[in-house]
Structure formats: C-alpha cells, structure tokens
Amino acid sequence: MSRYIDIRPEADGVPAELELGVGDVVRFAATGCRVVSGGAVELVGILTESVVGTDGSIVTPMGVPGTVLLRATEVGRAVVEVFTGNPFGSSVSSTVDVHVEGAAGDAGVTPA
C-alpha cells in the first residue's frame, strides 16, 4: 500500500535522504521545488491550500503557495531541491537525495 508522507521543514527540517516505495506521495510544507536529476519521482504540483466553504465553493487565501507534492513513480534515484521561506525575499534551498525502492511497504521509512 502506498503512503502519504508529510514533511514540515519549519518543525522537522528537510531530510538529506529519503527512502520511498513506488506510489508513495510526499508533501513538503514548502513554497517551491524542482527535480534536479533522476526520474524516480515526479513533481505533482506546487499548490496553495484551500478549503470548501459552507456553500460548496472553494475558498483560497491570497499569498504564496505552501504545499509541494512529489510522487515516487519508479525504482531509482532522484535529487530534488525544496524551497522554503519567502519566494520573493529570503528563501532557503535544501537538497534531498531520494531513493525509490520496489513497493511502498519495502522502503526504509519508519512509521511515526
């Protein structure tokens, strides 16, 4: 079974290495991301969090995006760069070496 992994850099920091299984989805609380090398992960999107209003409408706050989603697509490696902070000012870049193994349950990420 695939896993949803939530990483909050402001609280936990950004891991230098991440071991995933194919199908895992990783959420970074971050303002940006890019895949530097490798094809084992795809950048699903850089998103702004929204909520459903009482009338069913989608309410989205003004401001910068705060969520990055990555998905492990195939066995292999990738290097991703994650950006936190203000994208128009002092942002911080962190590099993550991602290793993707066969099935999500086989990867070496310890459950919380």
Image (cartoon, grey):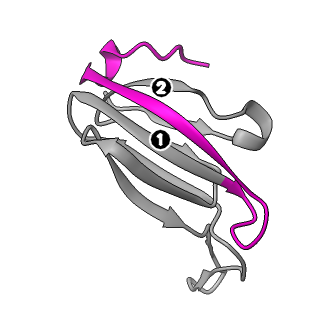
Q: Is residue 90 above or below residue 20?
A: below
Q: Is residue 25 left or right of residue 74?
A: right
Residue lying at 31% horizontally and 13% vertically, measured from the top left: 106
Give percent across and percent down for residue 85.
75, 58
Element assignment for label 1: strand
Residue 77 in the magenta stretch? The answer is no
- Quarter of the image with the N terminus in it: top left
Of the residues tagged 1 and 2, which is closer to the observer?
A: 2
Which of marks 2 and 1 precedes in the sequence? 2
Task: Report which residue position mark 1 lands on.
Answer: 26
Circles 1 and 2: CB distance less than 8 Å?
yes
Q: Is residue 78 left or right of residue 4?
A: left
> Which kind of residue does numbered mark 1 sit on?
Val
Q: Which portion, as a residue range, is magenta?
A: 84-112
Residue lying at 64% horizontally and 80% vertically, measured from the top left: 60
Residue 87 in the magenta stretch? The answer is yes
Residue lying at 73% horizontally and 31% vertically, measured from the top left: 12
Give percent across and percent down for residue 26.
47, 41
User: Camera-side residue: 77 or 106?
Assistant: 77
Q: Is residue 53 above or below residue 80?
A: below
The image's mark for residue 88 is none
> Which kind of residue does numbered mark 2 sit on?
Leu
Task: Report which residue position mark 2 lands on.
Answer: 18
Near mark 1 (Cα within 10 A), the count class, few <14, some 14-19 or many ≥20, is many
Rounded to the nearest angstrom, the CA distance separating label 1 from label 2 is 10 Å
